[in-house]
Image (cartoon, helix red, strand yellow):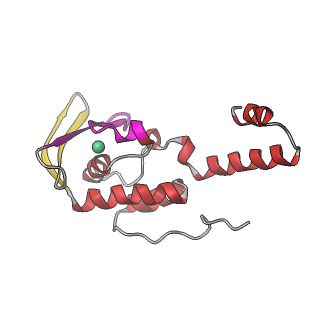
Amino acid sequence: MRNGDSEFPKMVTEMEIEKDAASHYTRSIYYKVRKEIKAACCHMSLDNLVTADNVKKCMIRDKHVKDKVFEVDLSLSSNDISCSCHLFTRVGYPCRHIFYCLSLSSIEQIPQQLLSKCWMKNAVETYSTIDLVAESNGSSDEEKRKSTSK
Ligand SMILES: [Zn+2]
């Protein structure tokens, strides 16, 4: 079987975090994440930045979204990060605003909290192995579900 993840994808930005993303995400998710990273490079501008109680608040304007300011909160102690657009909670990978805030903070690796296990390369490998085993045993769908939910 041919594995599309075997060769390293081409980088579109100069950001180190893009390489980090390529090393974590499956290829199809990586392309979506890369779009966010690229947008973070090109379309964002900083409106305001305040640090209080060890939390950095970045107010970010997206040149493509008029009259809207996104707020990214980055905890300097835990690297916890969230954005008012809530893309991460919806789709499981960080939005352009978060990438912009990370680059402002010279963070060049995606914080562990933002790496949803279901989009990781090794997660996909684990699931496909389970599928293969279940199929070769000729087990029913129900048994298969049991083994995947483990
Ligand atoms: Zn956002």
Range of residues picked out in magenta: 68-90
Question: x and y percent of residue 76 in the render?
Answer: 31, 37
- Name the residue rendered at 52%, 54% in the picture: 25
Identity of the residue drawn at 81% across and 43% down: 134
Screen quadrant of the C terminus? top right
**52 vs 60: above or below:** above
Q: Is residue 32 left or right of residue 38?
A: right
**Residue 2: quarter of image:** bottom right
Q: Does the magenta-highlighted stretch encompass residue 28?
A: no
Give the answer, above or below, for where 109 lies relative to 141: below
Left or right, 40 with respect to 148, comes to: left
Left or right, 60 with respect to 115, comes to left
Place of residue 32 in the rendered image (x, y in percent of width and height, measured from the top left): 42, 56
How many numbered dots are placed on residues in this image?
0
Q: Quadrant of ligand 1?
A: top left
Where in the figure is residue 3, as x and y percent of width and height? 66, 65
- Residue 103 shown left or right of residue 10 in the figure: left
Decide which of 29, 99 is in the foreground and name it.
29
